[in-house]
Amino acid sequence: MVFEQSLERTNRRSPADRFEDFLRSRGMRNTQQRRIMLDVAFAQTGVFDAEQLIEQLPGKSSPGYVSRPTVYRTLAEFVDAGLLKKFELDGRSVYQHDAGSEQIAHLFCVECRSLVEIRSAVVMESIQKVAQESNFQMTGHRLLVRGTCQDCRQRRRRTKRRVDLV
Amino acid sequence: MVFEQSLERTNRRSPADRFEDFLRSRGMRNTQQRRIMLDVAFAQTGVFDAEQLIEQLPGKSSPGYVSRPTVYRTLAEFVDAGLLKKFELDGRSVYQHDAGSEQIAHLFCVECRSLVEIRSAVVMESIQKVAQESNFQMTGHRLLVRGTCQDCRQRRRRTKRRVDLV
DNA sequence: TTGAATGCAAAGGATTTGCAGAGGC
DNA sequence: GCCTCTGCAAATCCTTTGCATTCAA
């Protein structure tokens, strides 16, 4: 329930509005690059990294080009502004829209490398309980479940069958 | 219970014995560097990274010197052999002794950067349940709880008091 | 106008690779 | 002696930084 509360709290206003507030409050400027980055970052549906964003941004000699350092700098700003949350996967930094919670839980399929967010009150609560038992003041957590997703298991089954027939 | 089972299964024989088997089974050689690495890696108590190991290994001009590439190569072999498990923390790779379980859960203190392993049947079970509900075939998981440990909270309290008196 | 933001080039840190020589078996 | 392993150097990958220029306010 703590989770849903914070979800509502932060999602009332659009990312663009929230980012403008953030910029103003810090005396930072609303540049073309930041606006372009915001559009592309919030067109993402799931988890993404800097490289994926760059691929979707205008090329080096196109009008809306954003350089690599600026991409990284701006992603950090989005995180500071509470628009994105950042975490590590496979040794690189990945991002996803911040729904207002420090809780991050994913199912990671080792075959198709898909990453699906999960939200389970039971898991959250059990984690909070363990932290409490260790006298640990928890500010957030990150859970990554590795395995094989349903699609890949089914695909594998199909493939096997096909192979068996040959 | 799955957890305790696998713990017993793999801990019967010493790391050295298990690694020798691993090497033999692959036609690999039991070199001085591998033996030295094994000693140092298994003298570690908690989580460690390549750099920490290198600091504890003989220096560049000493007898038992192991080069950086060999350290990384050998760590990967330990992981393959099931002696160590590897995961990411703070953007770099860290290792710990593999107790035979794919389950990894830690409390990470953001102040003193300590990492304490936790083992909670309740958490494990709730995670397994969520995976099942998503039709996800789980092979392992990694849970990182961020926050402040008891020591750091107490230290902070003490520090504050002191400051207040001044 | 003026200081913040950008792009460039280059640095940085962690890890990996190609290759010639060293060393298990 | 053969073939694996090692150390060296250099490359790679991702990310950050210094600095001159550009541009938002």
Image (spheres, coloured by chain):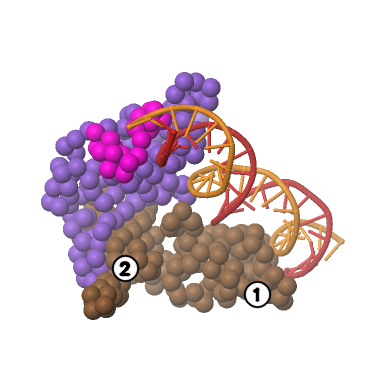
Chain colours: A brown, B purple, C orange, D red
Residue A46 or residue D24, whichever sits in front? A46
CA separation, marks 2 and 1? 33 Å
- Give me the residue at 21% from left, 61% from top: B128
Residue A132 or residue A147, whichever sits in front? A147
What are the residue bounds of the magenta stretch?
Answer: B17-38
Residue annotated with mark 2 = A118
Residue annotated with mark 1 = A58
Q: Callout 1: helix, strand or loop? A: loop
Residue type, label 2 = Ile
Indicate the quadrant where residue B135 lies. bottom left
Residue type, label 1 = Pro
Q: Can residue A3 be seen in this view?
A: no
Q: Callout 2: helix, strand or loop? A: loop
Q: Is residue C3 left or right of residue B94?
A: right
Q: In this view, does A115 lie to the left or right of B163?
A: left
- Give me the residue at 15% from left, 42% from top: B8
Q: In this view, does B53 lie above or below A23?
A: above
Q: Marks 1 and 2: in contact by CB < 8 Å?
A: no
Q: Which of marks 2 and 1 is in front?
A: 1
Q: Is residue D8 above or below residue C9?
A: above
Is residue B85 inside the magenta stretch?
no
Which chain hosts label 1? A
- Give me the residue at 45% from left, 41% from top: B72
- The local crowd at label 1, few if under 14, some if 14 to 19, many if 20 or more residues have their Cα within 10 Å, is some
User: Mark 2 or 1 closer to N-term?
Assistant: 1
Is residue B33 inside the magenta stretch?
yes
Q: In this view, does A29 lie to the left or right of B123?
A: right
> Most prominent secondary structure in the magenta stretch?
helix
Indicate the quadrant where residue B14 lies. top left
- The local crowd at label 2, few if under 14, some if 14 to 19, many if 20 or more residues have their Cα within 10 Å, is some
Which chain hosts label 2? A
